[in-house]
Each structure stands twice: as structure tokens, then as C-alpha cells.
Image (cartoon, rainbow, N blue to C red):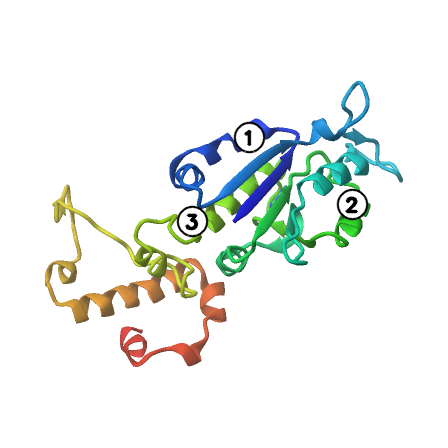
Amino acid sequence: MRIDVVSIFPEYLAPLELSLIGKARQDGLLELNVHDLRTFTTDKHRTVDDTPYGGGAGMVMKPEPWAQALESVAKPSEGAKPVLIVPSPAGERFNQALAYELAEEEQLVFACGRYEGIDERVIEWAQEHFTVRPMSLGDYVLNGGEVAVLAMVEAIGRLLPGVVGNPESLVEESHSDGLLEYPVYTKPSAWRDYDVPAVLLSGNHGKIAQWRRHEQFRRTSERRPDLLAEFDAGSLSRADRNAL
Ligand code: ADE
């Protein structure tokens, strides 16, 4: 997969050189390029923003530098349009299902807006060249798209083949099956006043699986009842019904 990120703060994306994503880049599993929007300006002051039409607080990002930047990074393959992700609190909510979907794409381009956002005509124009997906990390406002890109690139990048050493760990984690993950413990089995649940020391794999599934349902109903409401009851196995 190829990922291009356009930002006026390219240094913000430096953490993508670390850890699993950094290693995936070194190993050639992921090509990731960060571009400075200001290199696509033509004036002496490298201006990227201006006052909003209609008045109001703050500044709006000018369309032409964005068009220049996006045209230069788009690499359509066999007629398929790359996906342009525009992080915004006004976007569709990003989640694990979308991470899986986007991990299948050849190229993702992230356009990091700042200030009050990017001139809306860029979003309309970009549809000629990209599949455009405005996306939100959650119902709160960040100062710009960069932090959202860090989160989305990590969530998507770790799903690429070979990035996570043991792919089984992707199967049992939160959101992979619509439920939250069960709690985990390690040695020592007795720590301060707290013991590891006895079933995990029993060696009975059937009982352990049942306990873990029960904990998934318990946690999800306690912390995220909205997820449980969406959970497809038809997909409950007999073992699930026992765990409930
Ligand atoms: N930019 C500003 N706030 C954001 C959010 N909640 N999600 C994605 N991008 C954003």
C-alpha cells in the first residue's frame, strides 16, 4: 500500500517512523510519504489560508495549493481512483470496519486541514480524481487533521499483511468481532491483594474460552451498550449463548 499525507506540519507525522509502522516502512510493506502543503504555494509568503467568505472567526485553507498538492501525489492504478481521506469532525465516524476496508486500497491520500478547514470546492473538485471520504475520529474537535491521521494510519497499517508478527492477535482484539476484548493477566498469579481469576489457571481450555466470551459480553454491555445493541444476535453461537 502507498500512503501520502499532505500537511502544513509534516513534523507532526514523525511518529510514523517508529515501532510497527516504522518497521513496515523499512521492510517495504508500506510506502508512506509526507508532503508539506507550503511547497505547493507560489507566493513569497507561501500562503495557505485566507479569510472566510460570509465572515466569521478564523481562516480557511485556500483551494489552489491543495489542488496542486493532491494532483501531484495521486497515482491512479489501472483506472482505479485513490481514496482521499479528509480528517474532519464533520466526517463519517472512523472505526475498525473502515480500517479493514481501507487496508484493501492501493493508495490512500490524507489531506490534513487546519484552521476552520479547507475551501469546500476542493472536496468537490477532488471527486474527479479520488474517492473522497471525509472522516472523523470521534465527536470532539482537534486542532487539525494530523493527530487523526496518526491514529488512522496506525489502525489501517497494522492490518496490512506481515505488519503484525502474529496475525492471530488481530482476531481476538476489541472490535474485531463487534465486542470489546476480554481482560488479560500475566505472572505473578497473586499480586498485592489481587488474584488472577482461578479459571485461567485451571488448564481447562473450554472453560477458559467460555469465561473470556462471557467477559467480552459483560464488558461491552457495561462500557459500550451501543455496540451490544448493534451486535447481530443471529450470529450468536451455541457457546455464546452459554457464555451469556
Ligand atoms: N480534525 C479536527 N477534529 C477532528 C476529528 N474529531 N476527527 C478527525 N479530524 C479532525
Vertical arrangement, residue 117 with respect to residue 11, above or below:
below
The type of residue carrying mark 2 is Val
| Element type at mark 3 | loop
| Residue nearest the observer in this picture, 119 or 215 | 119
Q: Residue furthest front?
A: 78
The type of residue carrying mark 1 is Tyr
Residue plotted at (78% across, 19% down)? 45
User: Label 2 to label 1, Cα distance in Å?
Assistant: 23 Å
Q: Which residue is mark 1?
A: 12
Q: Which residue is mark 2?
A: 122
Q: Residue 213 vs residue 49: left or right?
A: left
Q: Quadrant of residue 149?
A: top right
Q: Residues within 10 Å of mark 1 (few under 14, many from 20)?
A: some
Residue plotted at (52% across, 49% down)? 1
Q: Examine the rendering and report whether any part of residue 32 can be seen.
A: yes
Q: Residue 158 vs residue 94: left or right?
A: left
Q: Residues within 10 Å of mark 3 (few under 14, many from 20)?
A: many
Q: Quadrant of residue 28?
A: top left
The type of residue carrying mark 3 is Arg
| Residue nearest the observer in this picture, 232 or 65 | 65
| Residue nearest the observer in this picture, 141 or 10 | 10
Percent x, y for residue 25? 45, 39
Percent x, y for residue 121? 82, 46
User: Label 3 to label 2, Cα distance in Å?
Assistant: 30 Å
| Element type at mark 1 | helix
